[in-house]
């Protein structure tokens, strides 16, 4: 098989790390060894078995050891982004000459993403990561990442042999055991070489097509570094200076964000009434702040939020429109939604048949005063118009008004969908519950609207392009009854897919106070606690016929304020929606509500 770019012949001819030639001379060893115990367990050749010192790999391993010992202030860092007990990215800031390589590695697809950044204190310029070629990169920084992935315990590509040899090499260098250094170095180089190139189940994945025109295809945008999308949440070596610890949201209110993003988009005055009017003291979620950064610093306009009912998906979409000062449109999908409904709907023509045409002027009127006769139909007085010109205009106007009247007398007519209306101008469009559509391929009808610059043919023959500043947010949950899968071509067009987390107790309290005006902290904390406990109970018992979330909490507060009975309010606003079975409702009442009420009495 052809060599992967890391191991092209020229890479073996590079100089070894400083002082390593001296160690080889002192121990009477060479760059290549034919001794079996210098070869990795993955080296399965039966004849001509050998191991070679690979300068880029050796440099990467030695630099990784130096990073662990942190002998210099700018020694670099390495860590992982762990999501739900699974590693999403390996992360590294790898020092190289006067630059630092800021990069991530996704072992699922074998792709690197990163930039090179100057080390100067002002932040420095950034450049794309080079490809592995003469005059570019030796591959050292990429091999350092693969070596790091091999020593992270519980990772899929942790390797016992590599880790043991790495630790033994580190010990030999520290203790001055020069006789042991060549053997451990050969084993580390051979192990990584075999696992990258072997083509077996143990192979470390690497996408050979990720380098193009001498550069790494995937690089970080300013938003990527600021938002924490690629930030590690477990630092294993050193401390990160660029990727940083994963950032939380800034807890900014709508009012504060409106000031920060003022002027980014403009809304036609006729659409101003569609701008949402949420309380200005609402605190924006992390998802809103991420989308704001994306739409103001990148061309990304297509997003998806997933999560249970009541987690604030629609509120986030409305909040985004309010902050940016854009009209808000919403389209709700159902099981029977088809391709036609995405573009237009059939609407009954109510009460239009009684419309009458105005009385036409007679011939004598036309002869005596052509301008006045024409005014009857046109509403415009054209002083000095001749009798012949007036007659021709009267015929034309009569035809047009007759056609319009006939058209309006139809029993039904087609009306543009909210999707098409939103795509004609800068706006925020929320497409609710697209996963409810029974046929996953239905949404592909919108692919040409999702693609930048593409054209969609409407039913009337008109061609329409999505306005480049139309922001589309799909909001859906994936676990409820009736929800299906998405077509992959739709998913691939999303710039971000954000799983919405449940609102925290503090977020619920702030939101409920802003929306209802109720501020009794003791009662609110009890209500919030009950709602969260019932929600957890429904999930634990896998009860899928009910729901209990923020909306139920808000209804409970409003009902309690109206009827002044907390138990009755809970029964009709919360428990009746949490379970359909009366016995289950009684169990919830006795377990979660009665104890509190008894204490109050």
Image (cartoon, rainbow, N blue to C red):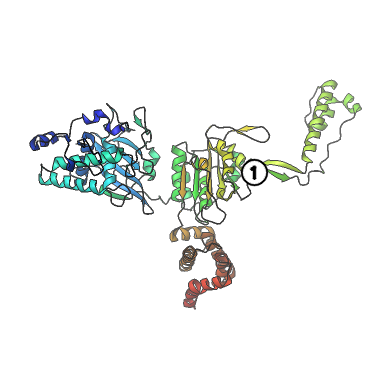
Q: Residue at x 25, y 36 (%)?
A: 140
Instruction: Give 169 or 585, whichever is nearer the viewer.
Output: 169
| Residue 441, quarter of the rendered image | top right
Q: Is residue 389 above or below residue 587?
A: above
Residue 107 drawn at (x, y percent):
35, 43
> In the rendered image, which quarter is residue 444 located in?
top right
- The residue under label 1 is 341
Q: Which residue lies furthest to the left in this view?
A: 26
**What is the tally of numbered marks visible in this picture?**
1
* Residue 196 percent coordinates (x, y): 30, 39
Q: Is residue 363 left or right of residue 442?
A: right
- 514 or 21: which is nearer to us? 21
- Say which of 325 and 381 sits in front: 325
Does residue 101 sit above or below 162 in this rendering? above
**Quarter in which the N terminus is drawn:** top left
Q: Nearer the viewer, residue 377 or 438?
A: 438
Residue at disc 1, secondary structure: helix
Q: How far across and how far down the image is residue 231, in percent?
A: 35, 46
Q: Residue furthest right?
A: 364
- The answer to which image quadrant residue 187 occupies is top left
State the image coordinates of residue 49 (x, y, percent, origin top left): 21, 37
Does residue 74 show up?
no
Residue at the limit of the structure toward the front, as seen here: 47
| Residue 392 in sight here | yes
Mark 1 surroundings within 10 Å by alpha-carbon count, few (fewer than 14), some (14 through 19), many (20 or more): some
Q: Is residue 380 shown above or below 322?
A: above
């Amino acid at each position: 098989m052809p060599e992967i770019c890391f191991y092209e012949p020229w890479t073996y001819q590079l100089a070894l790390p400083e002082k390593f030639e001296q160690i080889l001379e002192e121990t009477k060893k060479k760059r290549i060894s034919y001794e079996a115990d210098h070869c990795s367990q993955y080296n399965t050749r039966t004849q001509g078995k050998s191991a070679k010192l690979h300068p880029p790999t050796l440099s990467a391993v030695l630099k990784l050891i130096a990073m662990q010992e942190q002998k210099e202030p700018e020694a670099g860092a390495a860590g992982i982004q762990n999501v739900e007990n699974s590693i999403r990215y390996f992360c590294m800031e790898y020092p190289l000459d006067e630059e630092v390589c800021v990069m991530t590695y996704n072992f699922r697809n074998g792709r690197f993403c990163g930039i090179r950044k100057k080390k100067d204190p002002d932040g420095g310029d950034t450049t794309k990561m080079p490809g592995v070629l003469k005059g570019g990169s030796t591959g050292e920084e990429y091999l350092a990442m693969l070596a790091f992935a091999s020593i992270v315990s519980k990772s899929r590509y942790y390797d016992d042999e590599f880790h043991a040899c790495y630790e033994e090499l580190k010990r030999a260098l520290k203790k001055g055991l020069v006789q042991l250094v060549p053997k451990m170095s050969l084993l580390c180089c051979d192990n990584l070489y075999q696992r990258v190139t072997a083509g077996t189940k143990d192979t470390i994945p690497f996408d050979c097509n990720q380098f193009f025109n001498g550069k790494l295809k995937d690089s970080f945008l300013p938003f990527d570094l600021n938002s924490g999308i690629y930030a590690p949440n477990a630092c294993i070596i050193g401390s990160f200076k660029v990727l940083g610890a994963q950032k939380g949201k800034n807890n900014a209110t709508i009012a504060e964000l409106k000031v920060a993003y003022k002027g980014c988009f403009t809304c036609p005055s006729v659409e101003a009434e569609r701008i949402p009017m949420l309380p200005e003291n609402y605190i924006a979620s992390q998802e809103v702040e991420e989308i704001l950064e994306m739409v103001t610093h990148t061309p990304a306009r297509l997003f998806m939020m997933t999560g249970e009912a009541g987690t604030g998906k629609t509120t986030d979409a409305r909040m985004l429109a309010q902050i940016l000062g854009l009209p808000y449109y919403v389209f709700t999908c159902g099981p029977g939604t088809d391709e036609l409904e995405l573009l237009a709907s059939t609407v009954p023509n109510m009460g239009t048949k009684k419309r009458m045409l105005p009385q036409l002027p007679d011939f004598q009127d036309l002869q005596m005063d052509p301008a006045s006769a024409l005014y009857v139909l046109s509403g415009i007085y054209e002083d000095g118009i001749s009798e012949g010109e007036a007659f021709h205009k009267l015929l034309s106007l009569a035809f047009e008004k007759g056609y319009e009247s006939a058209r309006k007398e139809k029993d039904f007519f087609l009306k543009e969908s909210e999707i098409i209306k939103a795509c004609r101008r800068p706006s925020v469009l929320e497409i609710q519950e697209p996963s409810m559509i029974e046929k996953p391929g239905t949404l592909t009808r919108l692919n040409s609207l999702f693609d930048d610059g593409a054209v969609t043919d409407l039913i009337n023959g008109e061609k329409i392009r999505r306005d480049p500043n139309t922001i589309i947010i799909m909001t859906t949950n994936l676990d409820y009854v009736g929800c299906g899968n998405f077509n992959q071509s739709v998913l691939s067009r999303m710039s971000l897919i954000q799983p919405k987390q449940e609102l925290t107790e503090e977020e619920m309290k702030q939101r409920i106070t802003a929306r209802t005006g109720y501020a009794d902290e003791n009662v609110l904390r009890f209500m919030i606690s009950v709602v969260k406990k019932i929600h957890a109970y429904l999930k634990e018992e896998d009860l899928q016929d009910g729901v209990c979330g923020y909306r139920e909490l808000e209804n409970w507060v409003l009902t309690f304020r109206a009827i002044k009975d907390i138990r009755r309010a809970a029964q009709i606003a919360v428990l009746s929606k949490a379970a359909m079975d009366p016995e289950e409702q009684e169990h919830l009442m006795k377990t979660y509500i009665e104890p509190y009420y008894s204490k109050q009495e």
